[in-house]
Image (tube, grey):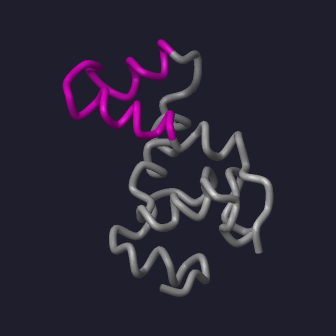
Amino acid sequence: MRRTPDAKLIAMLKKSQNWLGRLTSGKSAGVAEIAALESVSASYVTRAIYLAFLAPDIVDLIINGEQPPEVNLERLMRMGPLPANWQDQRKLFGIAN
C-alpha cells in the first residue's frame, strides 16, 4: 500500500548515513563527538546509526512510502541493533522478497 513518504523517517535515514560516514572516515572521533555537535545524547546517535544498516530494498520502500506501517521512525529508534542479515530484516518487518 502506497502512502505519503515519511519525511521524518527519510531525514533520519540520511542523518544515519551521514553519521556513519563521519565515523568510518575519521571525520568524527566518535559517537560522543557527533552527539555533542548535534546536541543529542550518544545513545540517540548510536540508535540512529543502526538505521544505516537497513537493507537497500527496505530503504527504497521507505523512500517510496511503501513500507509496512510498523516500519516507522519511532519503532526503528526503539529497536536497537537490526539483524545484520538483510533477509532477517525482511522477516522481522514482514517484507516479502
Q: Main secondary structure of the magenta part?
A: helix
User: Of 23 and 57, which appears nearest the observer?
Assistant: 57
Q: Quadrant of residue 72?
A: bottom right
Which residue corresponds to the image point at 66% horizontal and 68% vertical from the top-left?
67
User: Of 2 and 52, which appears nearest the observer?
Assistant: 2
Which residue corresponds to the image point at 50% horizontal and 33% vertical from the top-left?
15
Q: Is residue 48 above or below residue 19?
A: below
Q: Is residue 7 above or below residue 2?
A: above
Relative side of 71 to 1, left or right: left
Q: Is residue 25 magenta?
A: yes
Residue 84, given in percent of the width and then of the height, sits at 34, 68
Q: Is residue 41 above or below residue 43?
A: above
Q: Is residue 44 above or below residue 38?
A: below
- In this picture, which residue range is highlighted in magenta? 14-37
Relative side of 67 to 54, left or right: right
Please state, as top left, top right, bottom left or bottom right, where the N terminus lies in the image.
Answer: bottom right
Residue 45, given in percent of the width and then of the height, sits at 49, 34
Residue 42, given in percent of the width and then of the height, sits at 48, 30
Q: Is residue 23 magenta?
A: yes
Residue 31, given in percent of the width and then of the height, sits at 38, 29
Which residue corresponds to the image point at 48% horizontal and 51% vertical from the top-left?
51
User: Of 47 and 24, which appears nearest the observer?
Assistant: 24
Relative side of 3 to 38, left or right: right
